[in-house]
Amino acid sequence: THFTHAITRRPSGSIVCGLRAVDTGNPDLARMQSHHDAYVAALKGTGATVVELSPLETYPDSVFVEDTALCLPQGAVVMRPGTPSRLGEADEMAPHLRALYSEVVAITQPDSFIEGGDILVTGREILVGRSARSNAAGIAELTRLVAPWGHSVREVQTPTGVLHFKTDCSLLDADTVLSTRRLSASGCLAGYRVIDVPEGEEAAANTIRFNDLVLVPAGFPRTRDAILATGITVQEIGNSECAKLDGGMSCLSLRL
Ligand code: CIR
């Protein structure tokens, strides 16, 4: 797939209130902003247009735009984030999607919850991991919304204790998935070419393939080398601050 656009949102000062499973200290806004600048520059470097949205003080986690929508070639689906402090982020994103797409639909049922971080679009299907943020009703509603566009959804399970399905995996090409061992061992990636991240580098499983590049978090040399060995160009991006909030490469953009 060739991406012509990405949407990002600059981190705000409220980022210190961002959600985290384990508190390892507050992120440093200036350092996060400099990592974010490098991330945006890497996306632009592939020739894409990057829509850079303004910070939203009201929503501490709003830098993690991926969770607010699913972008497909035929249209976009506005998500319903499964944690109260993030629910309103979806409405903030909707107008920016309408500016880029003629078809924008939304998850609307009150009992439906689903976040983009749980969704992996491969060359053949859409995998959605059930998690603490994405439930069966949300996945069922997504399935109904994307069926007319020709997409099939397969529900899988996010490993216990892992925030999102894509915390533990990412697509390197239409058929190749980079994955933690704990995720691939569940069997949900059967039929794909799977590259397991080396033991101890589980935090590097969340990368993004964007045009000719794969963006990987800095500090995971064995994972970087495993991707390089496939012949894909790799760019390392600092992720120390987002990592304190359980965020990684995919969380920081919507790609279309
Ligand atoms: C959260 O807990 O929602 C944020 N602190 C991190 C979101 C990361 N997003 C993603 O993996 N797609």
Image (spheres, rainbow, N blue to C red):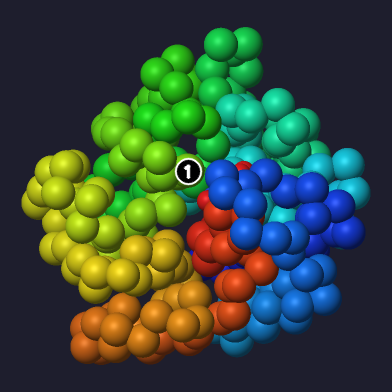
Identified at 40% across, 18% down, the residue is: 136
Q: Residue furthest top?
A: 110
70 or 179, which lies in front? 179
Identified at 40% across, 40% down, the residue is: 161
Residue 76 shows in the view: no
Identified at 82% across, 76% down, the residue is: 30
Q: Which residue is mark 1?
A: 163
Image quadrant where residue 88 sits = top right
Image quadrant where residue 158 sits = top left
Question: Which percent across, then down, holds residue 1?
Answer: 39, 65
Q: Is mark 1 within 8 Å of ligand 1?
A: yes
Question: Which percent across, then down, holds residue 159?
Answer: 31, 40
Residue type at mark 1: give it: Leu
Label 1 neighbour load within 10 Å: few <14, some 14-19, many 20+: some
Number of callouts? 1
Question: Which percent across, then down, holds residue 141?
Answer: 46, 19
Question: Which percent across, then down, holds residue 227?
Answer: 29, 81
Up/down of 95 relative to 42, above or below: above
Image quadrant where residue 43 sits = bottom right
Identified at 44% across, 22% down, the residue is: 135
Up/down of 102 relative to 112, above or below: below
Residue 157 shows in the view: yes
91 or 227, which lies in front? 227
| Image quarter hosting the C terminus | bottom right
Q: Is residue 186 left or right of residue 7?
A: left
